[in-house]
Amino acid sequence: MLGLLFARGSNSLYRLIGLAPADLLRGVRVPEAPAHVQTVVLMIPYSADDVDDPTRAFPAVTIGLIVVNFLVFFYELAQGDQLDKFINAFSLVPCEYTNQCSVYAGTPTPFWLTLFSSMFLHAGWDHILGNMLFLFVFGIHVERSMGAVRYLLFYFICGMGANALEILTSLGSNVPGLGASGAISGVLAGYLLMYPSSHIKTLIPLGFLLWAARVPAWVFIGLWFVLQLVEGLTTVSDVTGGGVAYFAHVGGFVTGLALVRLFAQSDRVDRLRAYHHQPV
């Protein structure tokens, strides 16, 4: 999940950022969180401000992606005892791409189809709910700024960039990688470059209360990216343990930064900025 965390705490918090409880995905290793690390802040976005589309165009691709992800997740839940085999067959396993392990039995042919299928798999309810929340909050605005076809292509290319960096930084790993967060990271990058002066409405848990805050997009997304980069650099040597694929997030984000100008339709972006009196 793409939740903005400034630190990690208990294993329950790992589930907040998208790792599955062992009783759901037994084939994916889930490590315990370091006991000395405490939870500091979790920010949950629920709306992007200052970028409302005056035309109210329906974001068909974003909604469609969310629906497909949930349909695949419900199919996962229906697998029962076959879930481990299903996940191993259709997730991204880095060592299969570097010829350091054999391709898992049941993997689709050609096996590189897992570059796409892995984007629609999720490890638990927290994982999919968090990813789909981020996709909805940011994706609808990126889609309206690119158009449906451009946006869909941009989404999948960002996912490919995420998978490529994950493979390069985990060459010998046989741990299945799965989730839409790499592609969604690219969507965040696109949103940041197009609407840096907008604001993100978030909920910040304070004990049993939720505090509503309006955070500048460049602060929210910028801090999120710095966290992914730092965590990725500190865990890059652990290629055999389960955990959050930080470098997949970094790869998707960097791909989005590089390609957003190519895919965005400047007239749409300028119209939205003018509508909200944002600087170009």
Image (cartoon, helix red, strand yellow):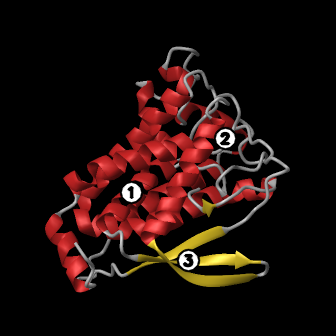
Mark sitting earlier along the chain (1/3) = 1
Q: In this picture, is 96 found above or below 7?
A: above
Which label sits in the foreground, 1 or 2?
A: 1
Q: Nearer the viewer, residue 124 or 191?
A: 191
Question: Mark 3 = which residue?
Answer: 202
Mark sitting earlier along the chain (3/2) = 2
Q: Residue furthest right?
A: 35
Question: How many numbered circles does the render carry?
Answer: 3
Q: Position of residue 150 (x, y in %)?
A: 23, 55
Question: Mark 1 = which residue?
Answer: 189
Q: Identify the disc placed on residue 83.
A: 2
User: Going 27% across and 69% down the picture, which residue do you hit?
Assistant: 144
Res. 59 in view? yes
Mark sitting earlier along the chain (1/2) = 2
Query: Mark 3 and mark 2: span between their CA atoms?
Result: 34 Å
Q: Nearer the viewer, residue 164 or 212?
A: 212
Dot 2 falls on a residue whose secondary structure is helix
Binning the other alpha carbons within 10 Å of mark 2 as few (below 14), some (14 to 19) or many (20 upward) gives: some
Q: Quadrant of residue 32?
A: top right
Query: Mark 1 and mark 3: span between their CA atoms?
Result: 18 Å
Dot 1 falls on a residue whose secondary structure is helix
Res. 147 in view? no
The type of residue carrying mark 2 is: Leu
Query: Mark 1 and mark 2: span between their CA atoms?
Result: 33 Å
Q: Nearer the viewer, residue 250 or 106?
A: 250
